[in-house]
Amino acid sequence: MMHHWPETLPQGPLIGLNLSPVDVRATFEPEVGEPISRPRTTGAPFMADAEWVMVGAQISAFEAFYASSLGQGAARFAMREVTTNQLRLWRFMGTYQRQFRKKDVATISAKLMMLPNVPWFAPYGREGLSTIPAWVADYENGVFGIDAVKATAAELPSISGTFLVRRVTTSQVTEGQEVIAAGDITEAQPVGTNLIIGYAI
């Protein structure tokens, strides 16, 4: 299961975000001449020193997210990169630090790694938040997914439950809570509908 930065926590801007690329070069020392370098991977992750100010219940919500959802920070999660507003995948590199300014106000700081590849679901995140879609039916572009995993259109009719649903048609964009029964999200593109996204509630 892919987790995302909780909606109740500060979404940005962070107090600070210092990004630096990880050196992914492999270097060899020949018998004669200058060292030879080549990249080990096609993309480089970035290390980030991040800070947030959290107040009241946000502090305990962050700690629960780190400990329970991420398994003491071991799992990857989706969060927007504030300089580009793009949804990216991150992981904690070690634990975090809390510095209380007063009883219910704390600065949370942590070292993070931003993974190099932009996830396929990045364009479908909930606007202004880091929330990832529970499912995507992008008929216009032929992109389909369920639970952060790419799927085929044939799998869409299996979707059921209560979701916050965003529908983009040729004439309007709507968003609201809907109860979806199996078969409501069809394999074939509904007339006039370009995109349907469901978010977990």
Image (tube, rainbow, N blue to C red):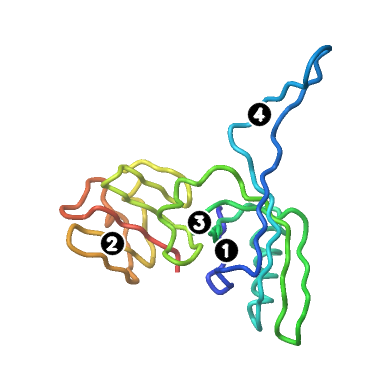
- Callout 4, which amino acid? Pro
Q: CA distance from mark 4 to mark 1?
A: 31 Å
Q: Is residue 27 positioned above or below 151 on the image?
A: above
Mark 1 highlights which residue? 5
- Callout 1, which amino acid? Trp
Q: CA distance from mark 2 to mark 1?
A: 23 Å
Residue 125, picture quadrant: bottom left
- Callout 3, which amino acid? Thr
Mark 4 highlights which residue? 39
Looking at the rendered image, the quarter that the C terminus falls into is bottom left
Badge 3 vs badge 1, beta-carbon distance below 8 Å: no
Residue depicted at 68% across the width and 62% down the height:
50
- Callout 2, which amino acid? Arg
Mark 3 highlights which residue? 84
Mark 2 highlights which residue? 167
Q: Is residue 197 positioned above or below 51 on the image?
A: above
Q: CA distance from mark 2 to mark 4?
A: 42 Å
Task: State the SS at label 1.
Answer: loop
Q: Is residue 121 positioned above or below 66 on the image?
A: above
Q: Nearer the viewer, mark 2 or mark 3?
A: 3
Question: Taking 175 as reference, is 169 left or right?
Answer: left
Q: CA distance from mark 3 to mark 1?
A: 16 Å
Q: CA distance from mark 2 to mark 3?
A: 25 Å
Residue depicted at 65% across the width and 66% down the height:
65
User: 87 or 157: nearer the eye?
Assistant: 87
Q: Earlier in the sequence, mark 4 or mark 1?
A: 1
Q: CA distance from mark 4 to mark 3?
A: 25 Å
